[in-house]
Structures are given as C-alpha cells and as structure tokens.
Amino acid sequence: MARKLQIQPSKTKAAHIDGAQFGYGLKEVDLSPERFAGLFCNGRTGRVHEWLNDELPVPPWVPALLAAMMTPEAKARAIATAEHLIAAGSADGTSGEKSG
C-alpha cells in the first residue's frame, strides 16, 4: 500500500517524494497521471509515469503543487490557471510536446 503524501514544512529546502507518494497525492487530489501531465507537464505522460515508477526523481515543485491543491478551491484555481496558460500557448503556437 502506498504511503500517504506527507510533506514536512521547511523554510530551507524543498520537499522530496517518491513515486508511491506521488501516486497517492494524485489520488488525493483526484487527478489521473494523464490529466496531471496534460495540465502541468506539457502533456508529457511518459515523464509522469517515470516519476510514478521511480525511474526519475519527482521534481520538488510537484509535492508543493499537490499540497497546494488539497482544498477544492485551490485545486480549481490551479487547474483553471493551467488551462488558461495552455490555451494561451495554443493561441500563439507555443503548445508543448505530447510525449516523453
């Protein structure tokens, strides 16, 4: 069973989580790996799965984002912001890659 997402507050260094904690965090905020990738990783589902499988370390911004999305209002704001940025990138032709 995956360990619960636990982020210790620190003023001096970023939190690090493993793939199992990342998976738990995605479940806690009710996002699939594919949806998370589409919103926050330029559509790179392969990269998200590498994090989940501990093939690559989960970047420190990921646990910070997951922790910030623990309330429905914050999750809605984060998703709306990501969708706005994606739309703006699509409108000016700078949308990102879809693999990797």
Image (spheres, rainbow, N blue to C red):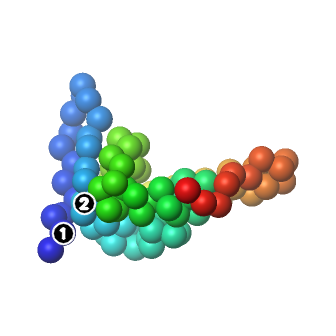
Image coordinates of residue 80 in percent, x first then y, are: 60, 60
Q: Is residue 69 visible?
A: no
Q: Amino acid at mark 1?
A: Ala
Which x, y percent locates residue 13?
A: 26, 29
Q: Residue at x 74, y 52 (%)?
A: 95
Circle 1 SS class: loop
Task: Identify the mark at residue 45; answer none if there is no mark.
Answer: none
Left or right of 39 on screen, residue 91:
right
Answer with left or right where residue 10 lies relative to residue 33: left
Residue 2 shows which numbered tag?
Answer: 1
The crowding category of the residue bearing disc 2, from other C-alpha atoms within 10 Å (few below 14, some 14 to 19, many at least 20), is many
Query: Which quadrant is home to the C terminus?
Result: bottom right
Within-10-Å neighbours for mark 1: few <14, some 14–19, many 20+: few
The amino acid on which the numbered mark 2 sits, given as a three-letter code, is Gln
**Residue at 15% from the left image edge and 74% from the top image edge:** 1
* Image location of residue 76, percent across then percent down: 51, 63
The location of residue 23, given as percent across then percent down, is: 31, 66
Task: Pick the residue in front: 83 or 59.
Answer: 59
Of the numbered discs in the image, which one, if any, rests on residue 21? 2
Q: Quadrant of residue 66?
A: bottom left
Residue drawn at 84 percent across, 48 percent down: 92
Query: In the rendered image of this protein, does residue 50 appear above or below residue 94?
Result: below
Q: Does the residue at mark 2 contact the one at mark 1 (Cβ under 8 Å)?
A: yes
Residue at the location (38% across, 44% down)? Answer: 59
- Relative to residue 91, is residue 22 drawn left or right? left
* 3D distance between C-alphas at marks 2 and 1: 6 Å
Q: Please identify the quarter of the rendering in which residue 10 is found.
A: top left
Badge 2 marks a residue whose secondary structure is: helix
